[in-house]
Image: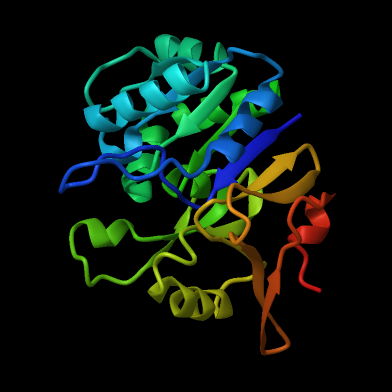
């Protein structure tokens, strides 16, 4: 039975450029990952691919999920180290939780497909391993993503629609409240896209367990939306927090 928690964004203790640290924001959601795993001290595999295996990001995740939340943390480096397919498979399929970090989604998906990681992640899904992550690590589980991947080279570039792993048959837009230009961009994108989009603000996540889905949040004011066009009219429906619905119904235009 598939278990996916896609998080729109949020901080887990990152340091600020001028000193100090951002507050930890997603703990309530992250504790749900541990609960879903069914273990008190689950094995969490971090995939920092979207950040090109950032050592700072790895240390942050190890400290947060390891020292603060009690997970046994390992990381899969696909840029900095070379593993055999057998070694990658062992790391992925022996984990209880897979957590994918933020960054360049397009670059991440390219290397995953090149190395066969996409197929192994599908095996992990079928095995019932918890699949999770934020931003790029949330988009990757969906059919499509509203991505800022081109902005890493050109900050003025437009958002793009990218093909992701397809485990959830919808488009995902993260950071819906933090990056205001996403709102208009997504509206335009969905006019040319069949199906629906799920738009998540920071500290909001879509939890999918089997054929059911619900919005969970780590802040009371965090929201998620179902967005689509129907009969040439734009629809934006706020999701009800903590209410389980059929996934098929959630992604249906109605």
Outermost residue, left direction? 18
Q: Is residue 65 left or right of residue 15?
A: right
The quadrant the N terminus occupies is top right
**Which residue does the image show at 63% across and 43% down from the upper left?**
167
Q: Is residue 252 left or right of residue 44?
A: right
**Which residue does the image show at 64% across and 14% down from the upper left?**
40
On the image, the x and y values in percent for residue 10 come to 45, 48
Q: Is residue 75 left or right of residue 241?
A: left
On the image, the x and y values in percent for residue 107 come to 31, 45
Outermost residue, bottom direction? 232
On the image, the x and y values in percent for residue 249 come to 82, 59
**Which residue does the image show at 67% across and 90% down from the upper left?**
232
- Please identify the quarter of the rendering in which residue 181 is found: bottom left
Q: Is residue 140 visible?
A: yes
Q: Nearer the viewer, residue 249 or 64?
A: 64
On the image, the x and y values in percent for residue 226 come to 67, 67
Q: Is residue 54 visible?
A: no
């Amino acid at each position: 039975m598939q278990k996916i928690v896609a998080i729109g964004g949020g901080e887990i203790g990152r340091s600020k450029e001028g000193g100090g640290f951002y507050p930890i924001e997603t703990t309530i959601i992250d504790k749900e990952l541990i609960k879903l795993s069914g273990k008190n001290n689950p094995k969490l595999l971090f995939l920092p691919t979207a950040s090109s295996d950032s050592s700072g990001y790895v240390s942050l995740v190890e400290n947060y999920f390891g020292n603060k939340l009690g997970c046994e943390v390992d990381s899969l480096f696909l840029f900095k180290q070379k593993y055999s397919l057998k070694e990658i498979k062992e790391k992925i399929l022996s984990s209880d939780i897979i957590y994918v970090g933020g960054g360049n989604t397009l670059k991440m998906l390219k290397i995953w497909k090149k190395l066969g990681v996409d197929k192994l992640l599908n095996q992990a899904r079928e095995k019932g391993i918890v699949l999770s992550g934020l931003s790029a690590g949330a988009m990757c589980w969906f059919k499509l993503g509203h991505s800022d991947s081109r902005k890493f080279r050109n900050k003025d570039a437009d958002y793009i629609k990218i093909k992701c792993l397809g485990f959830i048959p919808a488009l995902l837009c993260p950071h819906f409240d933090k990056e205001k230009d996403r709102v208009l961009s997504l509206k335009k994108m969905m006019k040319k896209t069949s199906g629906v989009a799920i738009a998540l603000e920071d500290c909001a996540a879509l939890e999918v367990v089997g054929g059911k889905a619900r919005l969970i949040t780590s802040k009371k004011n965090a929201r998620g939306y179902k967005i689509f066009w129907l009969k040439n009219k734009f629809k934006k429906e706020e999701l009800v927090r903590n209410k389980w619905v059929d996934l098929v119904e959630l992604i249906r235009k109605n």
